[in-house]
């Protein structure tokens, strides 16, 4: 795969339906904007201008980076060890093309040296940084870039781009037809990730989809083949209650803490953005605080204060988020419904990777008796106390698993020689997929109740 092929594939993904959807979304944004809300002629002119610009630049590849001063949030990480920083810089520049560096110059007003420093920050705690430190500990000095990182052969660049394309399709498949938009922007970065993996391991990465949503695991083929089924993610949190919103609007001490932690934009930029919206800087700040409350940060800050005796500052936002996450996990732990669902999800993920439709391999399949959790009946009864709908979905999911078990046992009994062959295709994968979707639906219903 080369850049011309990538451009052609991306161009083909821009269907008329996608253009219509994009135009509708742009129109909705302009109609909600104070600047164009009551000015239909200006709004329509701006919409046509935006669409024309989008069509003119749709085939640009790679996509030019945004140059807004707020487009790039640089990582503030200081590397105190100058010897390590110099070695890391040499290795990073060996891996990254000059074109990629130049594409980021100007983002947020960054110079070339600032771009390199931001890249060093991301690599310092990566596999490369750890390997360099380990080498120094063993040999007393850092290695030269040549020979330490595996260089991709010039005739293998097409395979590099194909791997990046595969990675992009997995990462953005949940966007549906609109996945072309993030793919156009992030493919160069994914190519660099694949290049880094090859430099570290000397082979192309293998990928495994996250069965619970967007995401993947990247590793060597051997490591990916040996991965155990992932644990299900925690169920989604319930929506922010009206009481929590009220407290977040009225508790001035809480709002002051949220302001100190999140509203740290340069005053001149704040003024500029406020003028665009036709409001004052203070009104813009109050909107941002309201958004924090609506996003659940009010409750997170209150929990942090209850546990630590004070609100977190801007350097402790991640600590507060982790504390809130741990508290939510504790609340979910031990629930009969969640325990049964998580057990079933893990079992389904395991069985999905087995050759359930391969008659020749079927006799070697394990027994499917662990597909249905032991507390399935109790879980359905508990779900009924939440809602009849949840109980119905959960019971139906377990019925799907029983059907999957019957199909697995049937295919295990097939005669590999062909005598007495049952030619019906196995429907076990269909039953497993159906159960998986229903179980995730029940988790959501129970969490929102």
Image (cartoon, helix red, strand yellow):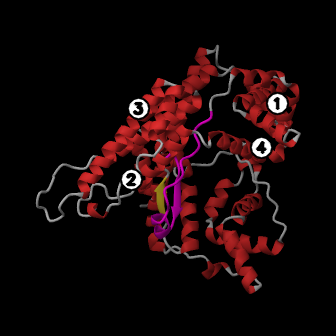
Q: Where, by quadrant of the figure, is residue 150 drawn? A: bottom right
Pointer 2 or 4: first along the chain: 4
Depth check, front residue: 290 or 223: 223
Q: Which residue is mark 4?
A: 320
Depth check, front residue: 313 or 443: 443
Which stretch is magenta? 211-237
Vertical side of 65 occupied by 78: above or below: below
Depth check, front residue: 90 or 84: 84
Depth check, front residue: 302 or 51: 302
Can the viewer see residue 398? yes
Seen at 75% across and 52% down, the residue is: 74
Residue 165 rendering spot, x and y as whole percentages: 46, 55
Residue 394 rendering spot, x and y as whole percentages: 44, 34
The answer to whether the residue labelled 2 contacts the one labelled 4, judged by CB atoms less than 8 Å apart, is no
Pointer 3 or 4: first along the chain: 3
Vertical side of 426 occupied by 247: above or below: above
The CA span between labels 3 and 4 is 43 Å
Residue mark closest to the camera, 2 vs 3? 2
The CA span between labels 4 and 1 is 29 Å
The answer to whether the residue labelled 3 contacts the one labelled 4, judged by CB atoms less than 8 Å apart, is no
Seen at 69% across and 32% down, the residue is: 295
Q: Which residue is mark 2?
A: 352
Q: Which mark is residue 271?
A: 1
Q: Which residue is mark 3?
A: 17
Residue 218 rendering spot, x and y as whole percentages: 52, 61
Residue mark closest to the camera, 4 vs 1? 4
Vertical side of 82 occupied by 373: above or below: above
The answer to whether the residue labelled 4 contacts the one labelled 1, judged by CB atoms less than 8 Å apart, is no
């Amino acid at each position: 795969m080369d850049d011309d092929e990538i451009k052609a594939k991306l161009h083909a993904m821009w269907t008329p339906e996608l253009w219509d959807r994009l135009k509708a979304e742009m129109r909705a944004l302009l109609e909600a904007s104070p600047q164009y809300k009551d000015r239909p002629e200006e709004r329509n002119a701006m919409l046509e201008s935006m669409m024309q610009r989008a069509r003119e630049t749709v085939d640009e590849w790679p996509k030019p980076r945004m140059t807004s001063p707020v487009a790039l949030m640089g990582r503030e990480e200081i590397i105190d060890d100058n010897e390590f920083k110099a070695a890391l810089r040499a290795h990073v520049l060996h891996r990254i093309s000059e074109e990629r560096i130049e594409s980021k110059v100007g983002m947020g007003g960054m110079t070339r040296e600032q771009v390199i420093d931001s890249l060093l920050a991301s690599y310092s705690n990566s596999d490369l940084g750890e390997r360099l430190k380990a080498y120094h500990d063993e040999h007393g000095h850092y290695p030269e870039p040549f020979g330490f990182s595996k260089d991709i052969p010039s005739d293998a660049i097409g395979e590099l781009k194909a791997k990046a394309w595969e990675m992009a399709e997995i990462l953005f498949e949940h966007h549906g037809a609109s996945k072309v938009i993030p793919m156009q922007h992030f493919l160069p970065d994914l190519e660099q990730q694949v290049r880094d993996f090859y430099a570290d391991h000397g082979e192309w990465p293998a990928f495994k989809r996250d069965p619970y949503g967007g995401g993947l695991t990247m590793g060597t083929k051997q490591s990916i083949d040996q991965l155990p089924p992932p644990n299900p993610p925690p169920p989604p949190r319930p929506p922010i209650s009206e009481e929590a919103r009220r407290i977040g609007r009225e508790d001035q001490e809480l709002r002051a803490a949220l302001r100190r932690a999140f509203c740290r934009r340069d005053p001149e930029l704040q003024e500029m953005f406020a003028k665009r919206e036709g409001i004052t800087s203070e009104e813009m700040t109050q909107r941002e605080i309201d958004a924090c409350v609506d996003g659940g940060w009010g409750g997170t800050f209150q929990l942090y204060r209850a546990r630590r005796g004070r609100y977190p500052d801007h350097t402790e936002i991640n600590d507060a988020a982790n504390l809130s996450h741990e508290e939510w996990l504790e609340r979910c732990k031990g629930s009969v419904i969640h325990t049964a669902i998580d057990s079933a999800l893990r079992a389904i993920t395991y069985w999905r990777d087995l050759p359930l439709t391969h008659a020749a391999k079927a006799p070697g399949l394990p027994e499917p008796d662990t597909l249905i959790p032991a507390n399935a009946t109790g879980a359905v009864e508990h779900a009924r106390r939440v809602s009849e709908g949840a109980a119905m979905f959960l019971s139906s999911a377990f019925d799907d698993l029983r059907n999957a078990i019957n199909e697995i046992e049937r295919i295990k009994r097939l005669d590999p020689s062909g005598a007495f062959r049952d030619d019906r295709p196995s429907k076990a994968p269909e039953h497993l997929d159906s159960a998986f979707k229903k179980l995730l639906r029940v988790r959501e219903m129970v969490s929102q109740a």
